[in-house]
Image (cartoon, helix red, strand yellow):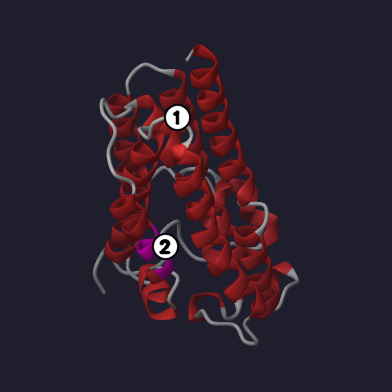
């Protein structure tokens, strides 16, 4: 067995130990510190670091080893909150096309939720970090392109981004069986069947995940309104 095998943040925790399961992995600390330096001294950059700390260092990391629904929260924080905050911290200096970044970010989100890819990421830490890096990097590219769009054009891309996530959430919610071997037994410790856990995760992706997209869409709509008023 190599040092890369196994579930990142350790084995699935029981409810009584979850508050003690903080992650102090040097690799995660180094990545977050590096992103803090790259994001610059700005409020969005500081906020992104806080979100990434919650995502990778708090007990949420361990909980996502047990529950698919917690993993969904982890991914929503990553692609819909941390990534756009990082994009705001380092905005594009010119308008860039959002079509290709949208396709790449959406494809990554869907591909990493295929059972074979998802289970591989939760059993091998090298694959896990490829998952996390690709989701964050491609989401950052998408949001950076969206925020660079003139006037209110970015609002459409925000809606399409949420649509890609919401459709995936709907499929997972309505699936008749549990799809992920990585969560075949751990949800039972938390009083849920694997299918119920998957349905909860799908619902989070389908509905509450729309809240950050609504915030970013509202920000862009306000920016467009101000531009219209100035004109």
Please name the predominant secondary structure of the magenta segment in the image.
helix
Residue depicted at x 65% and y 73%: 173
Please give left or right for residue 11 compared with residue 107 in the image: right
**Image coordinates for residue 114, horizontal then vertical, percent:** 43, 76
Residue sitting farthest toward the front: 231
**Image coordinates for residue 22, horizontal then vertical, percent:** 52, 45
Query: Which image quarter is the N terminus in?
Result: bottom left
Is the residue marked by circle 1 packed among few (<14), some (14-19), or many (20+) residues within 10 Å?
some
Residue depicted at x 38% and y 72%: 123
Task: Read off the magenta span.
Answer: 106-110
* Disc nearest the viewer among 2 and 1: 1
Secondary structure under badge 1?
A: loop
Circle 1 residue: 151
Residue at mark 2 to residue at mark 1: CA–CA distance: 27 Å
Closer to the camera in the image, 22 or 172? 172
Circle 2 residue: 109
Residue depicted at x 50% and y 81%: 181
Closer to the camera in the image, 211 or 69? 211
Task: Give the mark nearest the N terminus, 2 or 1.
Answer: 2
Q: Quadrant of residue 216?
A: top right
Residue sitting farthest toward the bottom: 176
Please give left or right for residue 168 compared with residue 28 in the image: right
**Image coordinates for residue 9, horizontal then vertical, percent:** 45, 56
**Image coordinates for residue 189, horizontal then vertical, percent:** 69, 71
């Amino acid at each position: 067995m190599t040092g890369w095998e196994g579930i990142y943040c350790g084995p699935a925790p029981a409810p009584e130990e979850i508050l003690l399961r903080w992650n102090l992995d040097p690799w995660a600390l180094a990545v977050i510190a590096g992103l803090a330096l790259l994001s610059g001294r700005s409020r969005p950059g500081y906020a992104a670091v806080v979100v990434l700390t919650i995502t990778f260092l708090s007990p949420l990391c361990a909980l996502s080893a047990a529950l698919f629904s917690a993993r969904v929260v982890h991914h929503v924080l990553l692609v819909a909150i941390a990534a756009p905050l990082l994009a705001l911290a380092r905005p594009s200096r010119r308008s860039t096309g959002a079509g290709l970044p949208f396709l790449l970010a959406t494809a990554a989100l869907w591909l990493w939720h295929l059972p074979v890819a998802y289970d591989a990421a939760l059993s091998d830490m090298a694959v896990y970090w490829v998952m996390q890096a690709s989701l964050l990097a491609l989401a950052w590219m998408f949001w950076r392109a969206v925020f660079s769009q003139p006037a209110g054009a970015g609002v459409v891309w925000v809606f399409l981004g949420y649509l890609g996530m919401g459709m995936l959430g709907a499929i997972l919610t309505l699936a008749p069986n549990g799809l992920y071997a990585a969560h075949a037994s751990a949800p039972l410790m938390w009083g849920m069947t694997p299918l119920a856990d998957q349905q909860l995760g799908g619902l989070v992706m389908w509905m509450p995940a729309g809240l950050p997209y609504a915030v970013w869409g509202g920000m862009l709509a306000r920016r467009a309104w101000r531009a219209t008023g100035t004109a």
